[in-house]
Amino acid sequence: MSMHNPPHPGEFIREVFLDPYQISYRKAAEKLKVAPSTFLRLIQGKSNVSPEMALRLSKTLGRSPESWLTMQDNFNLWKARQTTNLDEVEPLVING
């Protein structure tokens, strides 16, 4: 089942973990052991969750690394569906 306009993981982090508890992105970056600019790009939706970041997020914020990567994949796939024209793409028919 496809999701309608899923959140970017950074938006999710901001809305669920940072804003409600008034945690600064700098404090979170410190706990993640990444540069504040790296984490800021993530929560602004300007960068994606990498496998390494998924491991860090899992340890610092909880949730499994797989769930962070799935959230990123769902967001990326949704965005691709908005911009990719498949009108001329054809199925490959295999005669067996």
Image (cartoon, rainbow, N blue to C red):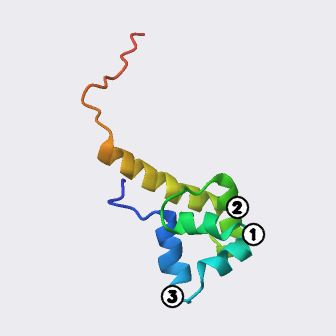
Query: What residue is pinned by disc 2?
Result: 55
Residue found at the very far right of the displayed protein: 33
Instruction: Please give the name of the residue rendered at 34% of the width and 23% of the height, measured from the top-left corner.
Output: 91
Query: What residue is pinned by disc 1?
Result: 33
| Image mark for residue 2 | none
Q: Residues within 10 Å of mark 3 (few under 14, many from 20)?
A: few
Separation of marks 2 and 3 at Cα, in angstroms: 23 Å
Instruction: Please give the name of the residue rendered at 28% of the width and 35% of the height, measured from the top-left corner.
Output: 85
Query: What residue is pinned by disc 3?
Result: 20
Secondary-structure class at tag 2: helix
Residue 69: percent from left, percent from top:
57, 56
Separation of marks 3 and 1 at Cα, in angstroms: 22 Å
Q: Tell me: residue 79, above or below residue 61.
A: above
Q: Nearer the viewer, residue 16 or 66?
A: 16
N-terminal-most mark, 3 or 1: 3
Marks 2 and 1: which is nearer the front?
Answer: 1
Q: Amino acid at mark 3?
A: Pro
Q: Nearer the viewer, residue 95 or 30?
A: 30
Residue 89: percent from left, percent from top:
31, 26
Residue 62: percent from left, percent from top:
65, 73
Marks 3 and 1: which is nearer the front?
Answer: 1
